[in-house]
């Protein structure tokens, strides 16, 4: 997709309309390819919605409409596939925001912990272009501290990369 994503203002004004326009434009350019949209940190959206329920019902209902639009458009063979990821258990989403029909259609995927070899690859891969060698001891320490939890490994690796860049290494 070569077009511009919707603006922040468009998304805040009418999230469902902004999404429909984006999907239409992306579909026109897709050349029969499928589009995967990944929404990470879903708990942030859920927390925002939960807070807006009473303080700003119009915005709350707009985002509920946005999430329900995703639910309405989900079908086998659809051009757009959604991958939603976050820290909340699905049952928590369903209890806190029962208005969102999407929750009932989600399929959970268990996050598996990374073994030492994969942690080593995750840690070293982004540093290779910078010609930074990460000693085995460092990888083992990261593995020990994170227990191979994917997001924590990523966060530690990101901090290492930023530190290396700041130190001009």
Image (tube, rainbow, N blue to C red):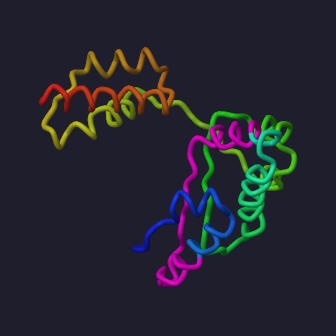
> Above or below — where is 33 with respect to 158?
below
> Residue 42: x and y, percent?
63, 43
Rendered image quadrant of residue 18: bottom right
Count of numbered badges drawn on the protein: 0
Q: Quadrant of the N terminus?
A: bottom left
Q: Quadrant of the C terminus?
A: top left
Q: Residue at x 27, y 31 (%)?
A: 162
> Above or below — where is 48 with respect to 76?
above
Query: Left of 99 or right of it: where is 19?
Result: left
Query: Left of 7 or right of it: where is 111?
Result: right
> Residue 5: x and y, percent?
48, 66
> Above or below — where is 140 with respect to 15?
above
Magenta region: which residues?
24-51
138 or 43: nearer the viewer: 43
Q: Residue at x 76, y 49 (%)?
A: 60
68 or 15: nearer the viewer: 15
Query: Left of 100 or right of it: where is 26?
Result: left
> Residue 27: x and y, percent?
55, 79
Q: Residue at x 24, y 26 (%)?
A: 163
Q: Residue at x 42, y 30 (%)?
A: 155
11 or 110: nearer the viewer: 11
> Above or below — where is 2 with respect to 153?
below
Query: Left of 116 or right of it: where is 23?
Result: right
**Residue 27 forms part of the magenta stretch:** yes
Rendered image quadrant of residue 13: bottom right
> Residue 132: x and y, percent?
16, 32
């Amino acid at each position: 997709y070569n077009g511009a994503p919707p603006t922040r203002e468009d998304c805040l004004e009418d999230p469902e309309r902004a999404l429909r326009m984006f999907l239409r434009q992306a579909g026109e350019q897709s050349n029969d390819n499928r589009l995967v949209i990944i929404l990470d940190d879903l708990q942030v959206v859920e927390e925002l919605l939960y807070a807006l329920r009473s303080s700003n019902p119009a915005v709350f209902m707009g985002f509920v409409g946005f999430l329900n639009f995703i639910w309405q458009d989900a079908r086998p063979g659809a051009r757009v596939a959604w991958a939603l990821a976050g820290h909340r258990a699905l049952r928590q989403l369903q209890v806190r925001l029962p208005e969102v029909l999407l929750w009932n259609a989600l399929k959970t995927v268990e996050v598996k912990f990374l073994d030492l070899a994969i942690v080593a690859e995750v840690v070293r891969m982004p540093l290779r272009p910078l010609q930074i060698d990460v000693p085995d001891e460092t990888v083992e320490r990261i593995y020990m501290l994170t227990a191979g939890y994917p997001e924590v490994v990523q966060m530690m690796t990101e901090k290492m990369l930023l530190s290396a860049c700041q130190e001009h290494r």
